[in-house]
Image: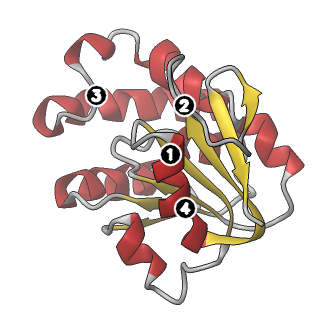
Amino acid sequence: MDPNELLRRYAALVREWAPRLDLVSPRDLERFEERHVEDSLRAAPLLDELPEGPCVDVGSGAGLPGIPLSIARPERHWTLLEPRQRRAAFLEEAVRRLGLDCEIVAATAEQAARDPRLAGAHVLVTARAVADPAAVRELAEPLLSPGGVTLVFTGPDAAAPFDADEWEPGLTIMRKK
């Protein structure tokens, strides 16, 4: 299916479920595509630079950035980590309806890191609106494969660790050593 159509369907699902689950701010629903989907898709070119392998979205919530990135790069398998059961149920429904290659895991990053299937298995860990880059790095490291990358969506005032790189404005990357 056409990626633009999948993104439209995804936005419609978020609008349908958002009032019951507080997926995004009510004022953001009207501009969901430009505020959230387009922002998430800024990371798609980074996926092209990484080796083959699965990715994980920590604190996926409404599926951001994992679902838009899964649509943009369908050859990648994604794990969407969401500890809140109702939001995880939304993610299950969205992935099912959109036919995406995503696994939903209702767990925190710390819990997922104790799962042998998930620990050390990902070339990319993403986090959007989860925590500051240094805190995300601590959550992400156990999930990354050697040489993997943590990508944090940051605001203009976020302090990045000394060895982090600004991949583009608002996108901070940290490589696992």
Q: Nearer the viewer, mark 2 or mark 1?
A: 2
Q: Which residue is mark 2?
A: 159
Neighbour tally class for label 3: few under 14, some 14-19, many 20 plus, Cα within 10 Å: some
Which residue lies at the image location 53% right of the left edge and 42% below the top edge? 133
The residues tagged by marks 1 and 3 sit, at their Cα atoms, a distance apart of: 15 Å
Of helix, strand and loop, which one carries label 1?
strand
Q: Nearer the viewer, mark 4 or mark 1?
A: 4
Neighbour tally class for label 4: few under 14, some 14-19, many 20 plus, Cα within 10 Å: many
The residues tagged by marks 4 and 1 sit, at their Cα atoms, a distance apart of: 9 Å
Q: Please, is residue 126 above or below residue 21 in the view? A: below
- Give amino acid for label 2: Ala
Of helix, strand and loop, which one carries label 2?
loop
Q: Position of residue 139 (x, y in %)?
A: 47, 62
Neighbour tally class for label 2: few under 14, some 14-19, many 20 plus, Cα within 10 Å: few
Q: Which residue is mark 1?
A: 127
Q: Are marks 4 and 2 in contact (CB under 8 Å)?
A: no
User: Left of 169 or right of it: where is 131?
Assistant: left
User: Left of 169 or right of it: where is 60?
Assistant: left
Of helix, strand and loop, which one carries label 3?
loop
Q: Is residue 1 visible?
A: no
The residues tagged by marks 3 and 4 sit, at their Cα atoms, a distance apart of: 23 Å
Q: Are marks 4 and 1 in contact (CB under 8 Å)?
A: yes
Q: Which residue is mark 3?
A: 24
Who comes first in sequence, dot 4 or dot 2?
A: 4
- Give amino acid for label 4: Ala
Which residue lies at the image location 66% right of the left edge and 36% below the top edge? 172
The residues tagged by marks 3 and 2 sit, at their Cα atoms, a distance apart of: 24 Å
Q: Quadrant of residue 72?
A: top right
Of helix, strand and loop, which one carries label 4?
helix
Q: Please, is residue 35 above or below residue 66 in the view? A: above
